[in-house]
Amino acid sequence: MKSKNQTSIGRIAGAVLLASLLAGSCEAVPPEVSENAADYLKNGSFGEDGMLKEANGHLTEFVSFVTSNWAAILDNFNTVAPTLKNKVLVVAACEKLSPTDYLSFLEKLEQLSHGPSFDVKIWNGVIYPTKHKEGFLAYNHANTRVKAVIDRIKAMLPAGDAARTDVDEIISGVAKTNFLEVDAAENRQDLSGIALPP
């Protein structure tokens, strides 16, 4: 018959084994990329209007894949999107996220940016987004979470980079004023794609 100590040790060992198995199952696994989404990641590009350009009819599936899996993609960014071009396409596709999810995406992207293989050129797609998130940073510049992301982006940009001036305008609120003036002049009053909830 087992002693109380042996039973306790067995339970502890079992609990440790179960915890290690559960921890192993929680590791980030790259999302399954469909053939069409993978094709777009390889062959996608931007049109003259700066928007993601249709390629072989796969744009919609690519955007759907990215917006459904953005957190897992970032957890495996260098695997899923190994080149700068791939990463820029992913960032542009994430502009289809809701404003709240887009901010969460930017925060997670910023966490990755401290790694040695992160190219700061990726931030150009955030500072100068396509029309889906145009004005997002400027419009929400006073939001505490947005401000923290903007400040960290600015710190990563090389001295003398022209984008630093634009980031300073975002931080100061000048960019928001300019954005709203252009928005009103062009009768684009729907801010639902960029306005964070209060």
Image (cartoon, grey):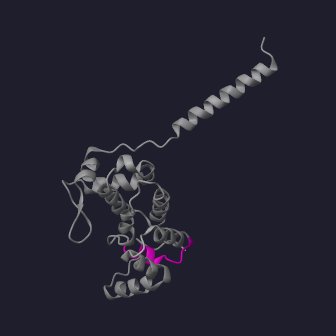
Verify whether residue 104 appears in magenta: no
Would you place residue 180 above or below residue 150 in this image? below
Residue plotted at (41% across, 43% down):
30
Q: Residue furthest front?
A: 159
Looking at the rendered image, the quarter that the C terminus falls into is: bottom right
Q: Is residue 134 left or right of residue 197?
A: left
Q: Is residue 47 left or right of residue 151?
A: left
Q: Position of residue 115 (x, y in %)?
A: 46, 54
Would you place residue 118 above or below residue 179 in this image? above
Q: Position of residue 179 (x, y in %)?
A: 39, 83
Q: Position of residue 23 (x, y in %)?
A: 57, 38
Q: Position of residue 195 (x, y in %)?
A: 46, 74
Locate residue 180: give its quadrant: bottom left
Residue plotted at (21% across, 60% down):
54
Q: Nearer the viewer, residue 61 or 130?
A: 130
Q: Residue furthest left?
A: 56
Locate residue 127: give its quadrant: bottom left
Provide the residue span drawn in magenta: 134-144
